Amino acid sequence: MKRFGLTVAAMTAACFAALPVVAQVQVTLAISSEPSTLDPQKTFDGGERRITDNIYETLIERDKDSRLVPGLAAEMPTRVSDTTWQFKLRRGIAFHNGEAFNADAVVHSIKRIFDPAYQSTQLGDLRGIGGAEKVDDYTVNVRTERLDPLLPSRMYWLKIVPPTASAAPNFAEAPVGTGPYRIVEWVKGSRIVLQRHDNYWRDKPTIQRATYRFISEGGTALSGLLAGEFDFVDNLQAEFVKQAPKAARRLGLEHSFSILSAVSGPTQDKRVREALNFAIDKQALAEGLFLGQAAPANGQMIGNRSFGYNPNLKPWPYDPAKAKALIKAAGAEGKAIEFVVPAGRWPKAKEMGEAIAGFWQEIGLKPDLKVVVFNQYLARLRDPKVRPDVIYASHNNALMEAERTVANFYQSRSKGAVSSSVEDATIDEWIAAAGNEPDNAKREALYHRIMQRGYDEAYFLFLLNTEDVYGLSRRMSWEPRLDNKVFLKEMSVN
Amino acid sequence: MNEFGWFFVRRVLQGAVVVLGVTALVFVFTRLIGDPVAIMLPLEATEAERAQLRAYLGLDRSLGLQFLEFLRQLTVLEFGDSFWQRRPNVEIIVERLPWTLLLVGASMTLAVVLALPLGTIAALYPGRLPDRLTSFLSLAGLSIPLFWLGLMLIFLFAAKLQWLPSSGPGGLAHLVLPSVTLALPAAGRIAMLLRSTLIDELNAPYVRTAIAKGLPARRVITVHTFINAAVPVLTMIGWEVTRALAGYTIVVETVFAWPGLGLVAVQAIQRDDLVLVQAIVFVVAILVVAVNLLLDVAHRLIDPRVKL
């Protein structure tokens, strides 16, 4: 009997111990797809970043104004030689499992992501990093294959993982980082729950617990928002902005554009390329297709916070009369213009293609619109022999460095830019110079010139800069970031 | 072996041919249309990176070799690793299949529970309110797109009235809306068939004889006509189950964020995850064949006249 009494007492105590003393500050977020992994170095699949951005941290971060600032690094890195950047690390930081954050963790993280057997698909923005060496417990030298002024920007995309925990077979399900939140559970198909890490080395965020749900259907997400089930909905559809309790919008990094072939077809003539730009009413596209949640792009494919953005460029004016005159002067009246557009990959690409073809018809051209599936599109984009006159694309330069944009699209095809339809020795020279220029001011000036020339030569159709749109509950306060990251630590509810 | 045993063996073999045929078709078509490497790597990835990933995924081999490898995997019931999730496809299917079975089970039970009384009453009182209701339901079931029905139910019962959760798995309450969405059109179709079959049976001479010799009407309906109506109705229910497994759940699971095979199939298709799509099709084809086999057996048990 006495034992029974003790058991009851113990169980009662356990029940009360499990009860929270004060209600926790909890939020529920609807993201559009479930992560395939929570290993932060393996892949970018749309969903994983939403979660791992809150669990893991990087040496370098971007603040709310998108400026590069030290994160796990104690200060911005210094260049100790042409191909070596030195990082001083913050002391006294531990991973959620108690492992120390130090030079070993950084060296391990870099080695791990570049291991060929590991097959990370995140390496795009990290290309050029050659390796890392420990100098002392809190100093690391990161080697680059050649002089690499972009390294600080790249380090925002390399999450630091703990050497011991990341070797565990279940690391993809049981992430361990230094960030403000740690994982509670991942119920596959259903939810991921994060809890505030109370020993976090910086200020404690106000949200204590966050539940992520995976809702791909926009109407369902909106209903959940209206029902009060969700505090946050990723990628709110344009049509639903008015119905949502609150919407948070901001012009993001996504820039739609098209590559005009300067090496073949009627678009070889600069006047035709200019006319194609003049013919398009960008404002009408932004309002008609994106319900005002987009703006005409400023004559380049990067935004005003990106390094190398040219502030002097304005949206290409809409002037159909001038377009007609240019077509006439070029003797291109009635000419067929092949226009390749992918179906599915980017929002409203097909509709954009149709609208643009309509504008070109009005100035007396015969647009030959080809809407194709993505891998066919890719084959055309990279086709070394037959360049499409015009090929649609969308550019999201998350690195926020003009270098990536110019290397892919402004650089000559003969110099290795496989998607490019340009041969321009002047631009190639400037790109090479910028790549070898350690001085940021000089480097920036070079990119300004490249952007200016791309605009003057009308190598592209400059289309729209689209907004990132999120749905919020009434009680949620949060400002979207330019880099499209969604940090719980920047949220609060009342 | 008796006649029944031979029948069973024959049907299992036929089923195996169907399953193999379907998976072979999917194998060819997914490889013709999709390129997972294009989706997995950013637009700016170099040709070398693409080639490396292609080799890693085994997509650099010839189509014939890939198919042989696929067949070898089938014989050991192993389906390889998902390109997208980078873990065994079997693991993913084992996680997801129970959710689909739960949803299909609940919705088909609900459909039958609704359809039997509706269809019976409609047959007994043609032209009256229950009959009209059945016709309305089945017509609506044929003409309303499932995703719209689902969204409207969510909007009404979750967003407006807030009686039920909008989406996702969870307790019993979470099961209600997706099950009802799947069940309503099916119930309408089953009830319509039951109604017309029962009316035919009720007008049959044996019913008149039974009533004339003094059997109570209720007994005639429940015992005699019902058993005769059971064969076509069972066929219809089986058809609904297979349609739900191999089609409707894709829509309903997507709308309700229900973590079943249908939802994961959509995501796998979007990502050109060829091997995962193949594995899902293989499993679903087996399920469909199994349901049909069960139906055949049930027919035989109900109606000994059925030729095997």
Image: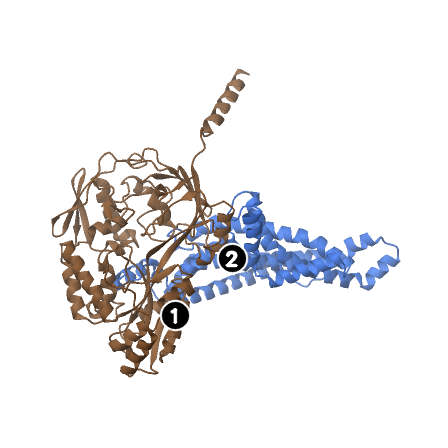
Q: What element carries label 2?
A: helix
Chain letter, disc 2 residue:
B
Q: Where is residue A267 in the image (x, y as percent from the top left)?
A: 28, 76
Q: Colour of chain B?
A: blue
Q: In this view, does A138 lie to the left or right of A177?
A: left
Residue sticking out furthest to the right: B213
Which amino acid, by three-letter code, is at mark 1?
Gly
Front residue (pair B77, B175): B175
The verdict on a common chain for dots 1 and 2 is no
Q: Name the residue under label 2.
A: B250
Q: Is residue B21 left or right of residue A395?
A: right
Seen at 62% across and 63% down, the residue is: B142
Q: Is residue B208 left or right of residue A467?
A: right
Q: Colour of chain A?
A: brown
Residue sticking out furthest to the left: A81
Q: Where is residue A415 in the image (x, y as percent from the top left)?
A: 19, 67
Which amino acid, by three-letter code, is at mark 2?
Ile
Give the number of the disc on residue A353. 1
Of the residues tagged 1 and 2, which is closer to the observer? 1
Q: Is mark 1 on a helix, strand or loop?
A: helix
